[in-house]
Amino acid sequence: MQPVPTATEPAPPPPERRGVLDSLRRWVNRPTVAILAVGLIAAGLRFTHLGYPADRVFDEVYYSKSACIYLGYSNARCDLTSSDERFWRRDKNDTGAWVHPPLGKWAIALGELAFGTDSFGWRVSSAVAGTASVMALALIVQLLFGSPIWTFTGGLLLATESLNFVQSRVAMLDIFVAFWIVLGFAFLLLDRRWIERRTPEPPPDVVGNPPQRVPSPLLRPWRIAAGLALGAAMATKWSGATAIAGAIFISFVWEVVRRRRAGVRRPLWRALAWEGFPLVLWFLALPAAVYVASYLGWFVHFGFHIRPWLDLQGAMASYHEHLQWTDPTTHKPIHPYLSHAWQWILLWRPVLYFARYSGDVRRVIYANGNPAIFWGSLLALPYAGYAWWRRRDWIAGFAVMVVAFLYLPWFLVSRPQFLFYATPITPFFVLACVYALRHLSEAHIAGSRSRPWLPVVVGFVLLSVGLFAWFWPALTGGPLSGSAWQIRAWFPSWV
């Protein structure tokens, strides 16, 4: 006999309705659903009015035309109007963008091949890559935390991260670098899970006789996939090489720990002996092969001769080495929106991509980060570092190490830099924030089951999404009055 509900208690739903609700809840609470949901959100945001503005913005003037040249279209169709552009086409089969490897430009070319050489055509590949980077980051969160709610949260935060969003809507290279790097580290996590399932539990298999080795196959499919993805990142921009260095370091640390847990004697030496060659093969030789393969179109055009190709690589290196911050004649910065690497996380200097004024109404596109994510990382990253040191939490260590390898090398680079170079780092800023938010949400008061910090966590997510909505007009070229713009230009350096 069921209890009779009191006047203050709502009647429970009938058993058949409870069954439907439970089934729906279980269906929604699935990793696949969470990843697809954030993918749909990211795609909806990135493809909305993707063709606006119809003119090329910022460095689209190089990459969209390079892609058109790769397709073999005429000078008129590629809009090569200057003598410089025609010279670079004859000399490099490219524009001034020859100083970067070709894979990202080929990705843009696929969009132009499918949709034409207009603004939508040259941006559609970026929108696809940006959407895919959100889904790949959601996969990483699922692999690390095993919780669909946090998978959705991480994907939502990146889907509404302003810098990732803007770079997903312009025909530039950085969003492709970001996609390949996030995908590569997702594959690296899948490789860790794959090999650990094949590693016997410690202690030694025979009492008093520790094992001399653990399973160390040469062919590890997810490691190979990671090498391919990270090679594609380097074949888009040379900055992808720092991700390869990070993957090698992280993989080696994991292999040492795997052997130590299994009771292998001298785990450091054993890891070096058994994993040294595979790491070189899959994270150096394989990416190098991907890099060379990305120049197949160049070889077809200029001939399969290695010396001219090596000369091209040397010319690219010389360009980046000798590019200076200031003009040697005027001694002024070569660009008004330069910023040093240490300034990126502070959002010191966003980059103006597009501006159009009509009376008191302005339309602008600024490449700027989401303040909640960037400034939140100033707290989340040190917290993750502390958790890694104090609790030996490998998840925290993973987040910190990836950010370190992607970010810190830029502090040593002398060439001029822009905020949008941080695009591949922002997914891992989000990961650090998710790590801190998850721990904060689970914190309890001693002797109580309450979670007093949960409202703060929910508030942070709402704040991050709200800031994205607040800055939306300044990220998409939407109309803003002078006063509306002023309350979004928080600092003098944001103008």
Image: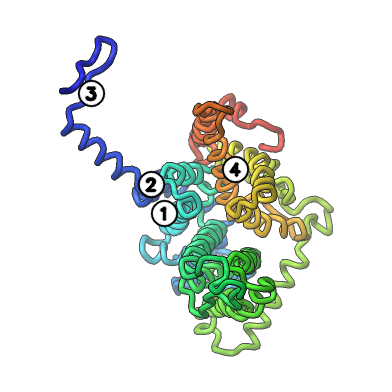
Q: On the image, numbered disc 1 is attached to which residue? A: 120
Residue 89 visible within the image: yes
Q: What residue type is labelled 4?
A: Gly
In 3D space, how far apart are the residues under numbered discs 3 and 2 (Cα atoms)?
29 Å
Q: In which quarter of the image is residue 273?
A: bottom right
Count residues near mark 3 (Cα–Cα under 10 Å), then give few for <14, some for 14-19, many for 20+: few
Residue 469: image location, x then y, percent: 49, 34
Q: On the image, numbered disc 4 is attached to which residue? A: 369
Residue 460: image location, x then y, percent: 54, 32
In 3D space, how far apart are the residues under numbered discs 2 and 1 (Cα atoms)?
28 Å
Residue sitting at the far top:
7
Q: Are marks 1 and 3 in contact (CB under 8 Å)?
A: no
- Residue drawn where x is 56% and y is 44% of the image: 435
Q: Earlier in the sequence, mark 2 or mark 1?
A: 2
Q: In which quarter of the image is residue 467?
A: top right
Instruction: Choose mark 2 or mark 4, whichever is in front.
Output: 2
Q: Do the residues labelled 2 and 1 touch (CB within 8 Å)?
A: no
Count residues near mark 4 (Cα–Cα under 10 Å), then give few for <14, some for 14-19, many for 20+: many
Instruction: Choose mark 2 or mark 1, whichever is in front.
Output: 2
Q: Which mark is residue 34?
A: 2
Residue 91 visible within the image: no
In 3D space, how far apart are the residues under numbered discs 2 and 4 (Cα atoms)?
24 Å
Q: On the image, numbered disc 3 is attached to which residue? A: 12
Instruction: Choose mark 1 or mark 4, whichever is in front.
Output: 4
Instruction: Choose mark 4 or mark 3, whichever is in front.
Output: 3
Instruction: Choose mark 3 or mark 2, whichever is in front.
Output: 3
Q: Earlier in the sequence, mark 1 or mark 3?
A: 3
Q: In this view, does 432 lie to the left or right of 323?
A: left
